[in-house]
Image (tube, helix red, strand yellow):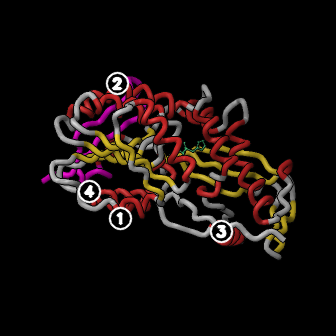
Amino acid sequence: MRAPRRTAHLRADGTPALARDAFLADVLGGLSRPQKAIPSRWLYDARGSRLFQWITNLPAYYPTRVERELLSACAPDVAARLEGRPCTVVDLGAGDGHKTAVLLRALAARVPALTYAPVDVSAAALAEACARAAEAVPGAAARPVRAIYAEALRRLGPGAPGEARLVLFLGSSIGNLEHAEAAAFLARLRRALGPGDHALVGFDLVKPLDVLRRAYDDPQGVTAAFNLNLLARANRELSADFDLAAFRHRATWDPGRPAMESWLESARDQAVHLGGRTLRLAAGERIHTEISCKYRPAQVAAFAAEAGFEAAARFTDARGWFCDALWRVGG
Ligand code: AVI
């Protein structure tokens, strides 16, 4: 028998978990509730991360493309605000590195010394992020942090005298947190920083519904594969017997939150076995798998104020689809 995998895992809110045990508990617990749900953090195993990377390059998935254009345009402005001081960039989720490279290049032109500190639990992801940063700015020092986000923030400590720190939390990863979790995470980020430090946070904004629907249910079916991989992962790691052909990806809009939500819908009455239990799903019954909150500018400003940041600048594209908010710690 294979030993269970016990790897540290990254929750959306940055808290640790032992992968297999926690996954089993989350799937069993989530499928036993009246509204079935599996937390979205389990979407990101190696295959899920590859599928998400693919999503970010789809024509229908506008957030990555729009934010990349936005950052290319605003990078000189961000860099100007940190001018003259040695700067450390703490990158909570480097993605494919394109966005970070633009910022690092702009900063390198303005600051006397630049340190790049990507944060990830995966050593391979950190090595890749550092290599891409070195390519973008050969003179930058690398200080990779192998930790979950919460731990990395705890370890940050006070900055060196005269140093400016810039924490990046891009891509609207904040949108995958429920409102209260997002507010708590931003408050924790604020407490980890000191006077003069900045945070650049990406928020996906409310926009026409047809654009949102295509982004979260793309014509190529990559988002569907990404969502269904959650059940495939349960089969692989928990010896579950989900019949993938008997589930459909669904993306719905909740105007109240507002948010796009992802679901896996059972195509027929069925039973699934895992962890010694039998779980039943009725035809049409849905498992909730992800929330992707969409924001209005006033909500972005409210998050800054609630967490105790000063809103330094807000960068938005011409259509008002995405916003990168630059926040500063006063004092
Ligand atoms: C990672 N996160 C910001 C993506 C989003 O847009 O919520 C995850 C995603 N889910 C489906 N498509 C993309």
Q: Residue at x 25, y 29 (%)?
A: 77
Write down the quadrant of residue 86 in the picture: top left
Q: In the figure, is residue 113 to the left or right of 140?
A: left
The tag on residue 101 is: none
- Mark 1 — residue? 154
**Callout 2 environment at 10 Å: few (<14), some (14 to 19), or many (20+)?**
some
Q: Give the extent of the magenta segment.
A: 302-331
Q: Earlier in the sequence, mark 2 or mark 4?
A: 2
Name the amino acid type tagged 4: Leu
In the rendering, at what x and y percent does residue 13 appear? 47, 60
Neighbours of disc 3 within 10 Å: few (<14), some (14-19), many (20+): few
Residue 6 got which mark?
3
Label 1: how many Cα within 10 Å (few below 14, some 14–19, many 20+): few
**N-terminal label among 3 and 4:** 3
Camera-near label (2 vs 3) is: 3
- Which quarter of the frame holds ligand 1? top right
> Residues under labels 1 and 2: Cα distance?
32 Å
- Asked if residue 224 lies in the magenta stretch, the reply is no
Sequence-first tag of 1 and 2: 2
The correct choice, above or below, for 119 with respect to 63 in the image is below
Q: Nearer the viewer, residue 169 or 264?
A: 169
Q: Which residue is mark 2?
A: 73
The residue identified by callout 4 is 193
Spatial CA distance of label 3 from label 4 is 32 Å
Q: Nearer the viewer, residue 41 or 62?
A: 41
What element does badge 4 sit on? Answer: loop
Do the numbered discs 2 and 4 sit on residues whose CB atoms are within 8 Å? no
Return the x and y of residue 207 as percentages of the image width and height.
48, 33
- Inter-mark Cα distance, 1 to 3: 23 Å
Residue 56 on image: x %, y %: 58, 34
- The one nearer the camera, 206 or 194, is 194
Viewer-nearest of discs 2 and 4: 4
